[in-house]
């Protein structure tokens, strides 16, 4: 999967794949997360997920060279993508 000749020169980006999932349970997310971990590649790696059960929403976090690489891993696992967004973490200066 993907172009194994890529290098980490520019680093990877972080992406959230959003999935609206009526009736989702913690077990559903755990099972899908296990599949995502097993399908990671040099181009995209699953990091973790956030379940917002009250909104029937799951956010799946990836580190990847580009959005397409994250989408390839998610599709291989059977994860439907309602939206994908790039994000950056911002930490407090005075930790």
Image (cartoon, rainbow, N blue to C red):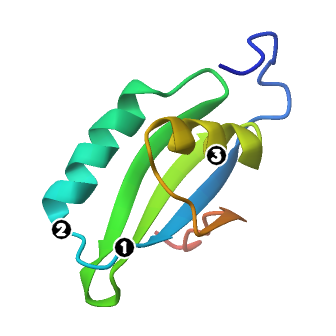
Question: Can residue 33 be seen in the rendering of this structure?
Answer: yes
The residue under label 1 is 21
Q: Which mark is residue 25?
A: 2
The residue under label 3 is 71
Q: Residues within 10 Å of mark 2 (few under 14, many from 20)?
A: few
Measured in 3D between alpha carbons, the distance from the residue under mark 1 to the one under mark 3, in whole angstroms, is 17 Å
Measured in 3D between alpha carbons, the distance from the residue under mark 1 to the one under mark 2, in whole angstroms, is 9 Å
Left or right, 26 with respect to 21, comes to: left
Reply above or below: 69 against 58: above
Q: Where is residue 23 in the image (x, y as percent from the top left)?
A: 23, 77
Reply above or below: 34 against 30: above
Q: Which of 33 and 12 is in front in this view?
A: 33
Measured in 3D between alpha carbons, the distance from the residue under mark 3 to the one under mark 2, in whole angstroms, is 22 Å
Q: Helix, strand, or loop for circle 1?
A: loop
Labels 1 & 2 near each other (Cβ < 8 A): no
Q: Nearer the viewer, residue 6 or 75?
A: 75
Q: Helix, strand, or loop for circle 2?
A: loop
The quadrant the N terminus occupies is: top right
Q: Helix, strand, or loop for circle 3?
A: helix
Q: Quadrant of residue 50?
A: bottom left
Task: Name which residue lies at 72% across and 21% down.
Answer: 2
Q: Position of residue 45 (x, y in %)?
A: 53, 34
Reply above or below: 77 against 40: below
């Amino acid at each position: 999967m993907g172009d194994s000749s890529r290098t980490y020169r520019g680093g990877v980006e972080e992406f959230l794949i959003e999935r609206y999932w009526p009736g989702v349970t913690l077990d559903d997310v755990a099972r899908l997360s296990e599949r995502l971990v097993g399908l990671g590649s040099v181009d995209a790696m699953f990091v973790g997920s956030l379940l917002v059960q009250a909104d029937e929403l799951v956010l799946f976090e990836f580190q990847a060279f580009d959005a397409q690489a994250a989408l390839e891993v998610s599709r291989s696992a059977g994860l439907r993508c309602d939206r994908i967004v790039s994000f950056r973490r911002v930490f407090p200066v005075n930790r």
